[in-house]
Amino acid sequence: MKRTVTDYWVEMSIREIWTQSHFAGIAYGHIDPKASIGTDLVFSSIHSFLSHAAMVSKMLLAKSEETNSKSIGDILGIPETSFIHNRKFRNHLEHYDERLKKWIKKAAMGRAIGTYNIGPKSMIGIPNMIFVSHYDPTNDTFTFVDEDFKLGELNNELIRIKALADEWVKKNEKGIF
């Protein structure tokens, strides 16, 4: 059977989902070890992790140019309700300038601002502090503009997605599809 352009596109998309999931896992694995070295490396790793996760989400939602085509997520059996598609933090990062202006107008004036801190929030001991960027390694929580995000939950979903992509590629290489 002759392969089509769409066949190649699907295969390359799934391979890229595997790669981006892999890179996300590497970044996630560097977060805690780097916490003892300094804040720059931790927050760089968190940003990298979230960026790779966002790329996986985008790739899963992609469809070929054919009419009524399935998304890559449909092909892999990953629903649009998957935790990978939680766009809140992806949008925060992509639209940081807009979010920051909105947040300052709403809540920041006259309050202490914590940014690029590592550790439990309670250890800081400043009442009514707003956390712009904070990582708590004791519960794997990244706080961004005073909203908490459990990084481990996203990492678990990426591990699952990577396994599904790997399984698909192996079956495809054996001609099962």
Image (spheres, rainbow, N blue to C red):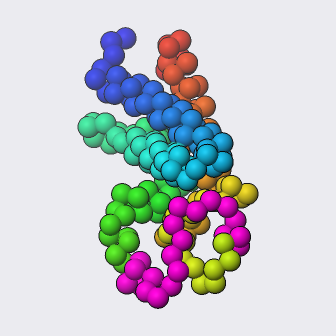
Residue 8 horizontal side relative to residue 175, left or right? left
Q: Give the image location of residue 139, x and y in percent.
A: 71, 58
| Residues shaded magenta | 103-123
Q: Can the viewer see residue 122? A: yes
Say which residue appears at 39% left-offset and 26% top-offset. 12
Residue 83 horizontal side relative to residue 75, left or right? right
Q: Give the image location of residue 101, x and y in percent.
A: 34, 75
Q: Give the image location of residue 53, x and y in percent.
A: 49, 45
| Count of marks placed on residues | 0
Q: Quadrant of residue 10?
A: top left
Q: Quadrant of residue 141?
A: bottom right
Please say whether residue 106 is one of the residues in the magenta stretch.
Answer: yes
Q: Can the viewer see residue 79? A: no
Residue 104 horizontal side relative to residue 21, left or right? left
Say which residue appears at 66% left-offset and 42% top-offset. 33
Q: Nearer the viewer, residue 176 or 39?
A: 39
Q: Is residue 145 above or below residue 57?
A: below
Say which residue appears at 47% left-offset and 45% top-offset. 48
Q: Is residue 31 above or below residue 12?
A: below
Q: Give the image location of residue 77, x and y in percent.
A: 54, 40
